[in-house]
Image: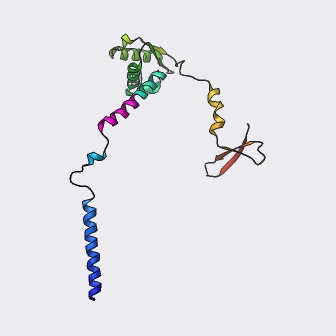
Amino acid sequence: MNASTRLVGRKIGAFACVGALLVLSGCMTPAQTHDEFTTDQQSTLSVDEVMERQAMAGAAADATLNSSHFEGNSLNELGRTKLNAIVQKSNGPATVYVNVDDGAAARVDAVTKYLKDAGATGQNIKVAAGPNPNATMAATEGLSRMQKTESSEKDERNERIIGVGITPNGSTTETPMNK
């Protein structure tokens, strides 16, 4: 090996050592900590509060317990959580609907007992069997918007609309649709 080759090798080795030192030490100064890069606890709590309020509003608007909220004739954790949200959100009289196919009377009793044990009896919360009549809507409202959700394009004569779809094997299909 000649002198110039050794000099180049030493320079490459020196650059490699400096690079490794920079990578291992990082860009952080001693005063910096990871806390400066994380959000503060207050902003996290405000997002959680918004989500909790939305969950309570949704539970109160629906106000229906289904079979998924029960284990046998007893409320499960999901049912208790939804009832708590309904109770917290209700400002006045409210009705909780128990919409189950079998054992409705026993499940209504379980909900009534839970509300009584939770101290919610003074809030004018009634319990009724059956679906919530206020939580329904006509199918025509959703069907009227259906065409707007489909991707479509007009054919060359602009006479009809062609719906474009994708089959499970990945090929595309064109289906004529009424206007």
Q: Residue at x 39, y 19 (%)?
A: 87
Question: How far across and how far down the image is residue 113, in percent?
Answer: 37, 15
What predominant SS class does the magenta segment belong to? Answer: helix
* Viewer-closest of 27 and 49: 27
Question: How far across and how far down the image is residue 40, in percent?
Answer: 30, 39
20 shown above or below 66: below
| Residue 43 among those drawn in magenta | yes
Q: Residue furthest left?
A: 30
Q: On the image, which quarter does residue 111 sit in?
A: top left
Horizontal side, residue 61 vs residue 137: left or right: left
Horizontal side, residue 74 vs residue 15: left or right: right
Q: Residue at x 78, y 46 (%)?
A: 157
Horizontal side, residue 117 vs residue 21: left or right: right
51 shown above or below 155: above
Q: On the image, which quarter does residue 107 sit in?
A: top left
Q: Residue at x 35, y 13 (%)?
A: 116
Q: Residue at x 52, y 19 (%)?
A: 132
Q: Residue furthest bottom?
A: 2
Write the start and end of the magenta stretch as one range.
Answer: 39-52
| Residue 138 among those drawn in magenta | no
19 shown above or below 124: below
